[in-house]
Every structure is written in C-alpha cells, then in structure tokens.
Image (cartoon, coloured by chain):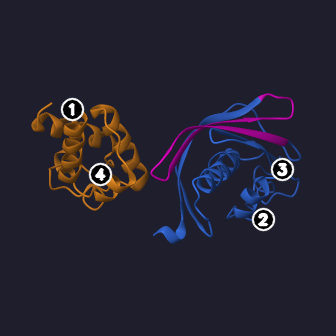
Chain colours: A blue, B orange
Amino acid sequence: MVDRIIKKLPYTDPFLFVDNIESVTENSIVGNYTFNKNESFYPGHFKNNPVTPGAILTECCAQIGLVCLGIYLLQKEGTNIQEMQIALSSSEMQFLLPVYPLETVTVTSSKIYFRFNKLKCSVKMHNKKGAVVCTGILSGMLKEKNNE
Amino acid sequence: MDKKEQFKKVKEIVTVYLPEDVPKEAISKESNLINELNINSANMVDIVLDVEDAFGIRLENSDMDQIHTIEDALNIINQKVVNKNN
C-alpha cells in the first residue's frame, strides 16, 4: 500500500520531499524525509550558510500530509488513479526551529476533513530529537484527472 | 427560517470567501459563484460546509454539481430543509 502511494506521487528530483511513509490510516499519516547536502536550494539559501527554506518545509509537509494521504484516501474510495490533479489551496504555518542539510524530519498529518475533493489537515514536523520544527494547517484540492 | 432569512444567511456565508476585489453588494440571487463572484473551487467547498452547519443539512457531490448561482444553492437548501422537517 505504501509503495503504491509513493509511486503515484507526481514529483521527482529535485522536488520530491518524501522518502518513507511510516504509517497511514484514513485519519492520519506519518512520513519522513532526509534533506541531502546537495539539495538545489542550499547554495542560495543562504550564501555560505545552508538552511532549509520554510517554503520547502511547507512543501514537505504538503507532499506527505496532503498528497500522500490524499492518494491513500482516493484509493480507499476505489478511485483508480492514473494521473492526479493537485493544487495547494491554503497554508498557515508557524516555524519554530531551523532544519540543516542531512537532517531527517518526520511529518505527522491529521485529517480535518476530506470532502468534495478538498483535503484539509493539521500538520506537524519533528526533527530527529523529537522537537517540533513547524506546525500548521494545510489544504489542497486533489482529484483524478480523467474525472473531468 | 423563511426564504428571505435563508438568502441573508447564505449571503453572510459567501461574503467571508469573496476575493478582495469583489464587493459584497455584488451578491444577488442571480450571481454565478465561480464566474461572477470569483469564488475558487477550494472556497466553494468551504461555503458548502458552512451551509451544511448553518442549516443542519448534508450536501452530496451531485448537489454540489448543481450549484452555479446563489439561487441554485437556495433551492437545494430549501429542498433539504423541507425534507429534514418532514
């Protein structure tokens, strides 16, 4: 099941921020990602001082918390996903700690609702020490493209 | 809630999700939510969920597909409220 989720993700290097899904149910998902030292944004953010941008942490939360969970929910509904149409529709995040190259982060996402193709979740990212890196509410629209 | 109050309630709900450049005076029964009031599909879902809470009803995908104007929404709401009370 987990393999089937990751295979359906519409991202690839250098913009895939999911390594593993640790658990998934219809109400929540846990996944992780390790930022390698050669990520495309580190040379520019910041000069001689690589720190993972908040926008990328949000993206990582969205890929695991909205898109992976959304694929699971659509598959559970019996939708045979060939091609996905997805869009982030809102994000409200707080950032508490920096994430440096080679750090592994774990994203936990809890479904608030999934109705009419809109998934809204409460997300939290922890670092290896178990400290909260960022937290917030994300929502996005997800559907199977052939449904149009 | 009579029909006039229903319209007032729907107007209140929709107002919250109007883009900044659309004044709330633009909302009439004939207004098309997506094409005229510029409500995007994500906010359409929020409007439907708020309508469900406000009127104590549940809308299905097929209802959602029929909602183009405020009037369409009012008709579906009225029908669901009547069914609920019978």
- From the viewer's perspective, tell me whether residue B13 is left or right of residue A47: left
Q: Which residue is mark 1?
A: B85
Are dots 4 and 2 in contact, CB under 8 Å?
no
Q: Residues within 10 Å of mark 2 (few under 14, many from 20)?
A: few
Q: Which residue is mark 2?
A: A13
From the image, state whether disc 3 or disc 1 is nearer to you: 1
Which region shows up in magenta?
A104-131
Inter-mark Cα distance, 1 to 4: 39 Å
Residue A93 in view (yes/no): no
Q: Is residue A107 above or below residue A47?
A: above
Instruction: Name the residue: 17% across, 37% down.
Output: B6
> Which residue appears farthest toward the front when viewing the image?
B86
Q: Main secondary structure of the magenta part?
A: strand
The verdict on a common chain for dots 3 and 4 is: no
Instruction: Name the residue: 28% across, 58% down.
Output: B66
Q: Residues within 10 Å of mark 1 (few under 14, many from 20)?
A: few
Residue A95 spot, x, y in % from top left: 67, 34
The disc placed on residue A43 is none
Residue A109 within the magenta-colored segment of the rendering: yes
The disc placed on residue B21 is 4
Q: Residues within 10 Å of mark 4 (few under 14, many from 20)?
A: few
Inter-mark Cα distance, 3 to 1: 56 Å
Subunit under mark 1: B
From the image, state whether disc 1 or disc 2 is nearer to you: 1
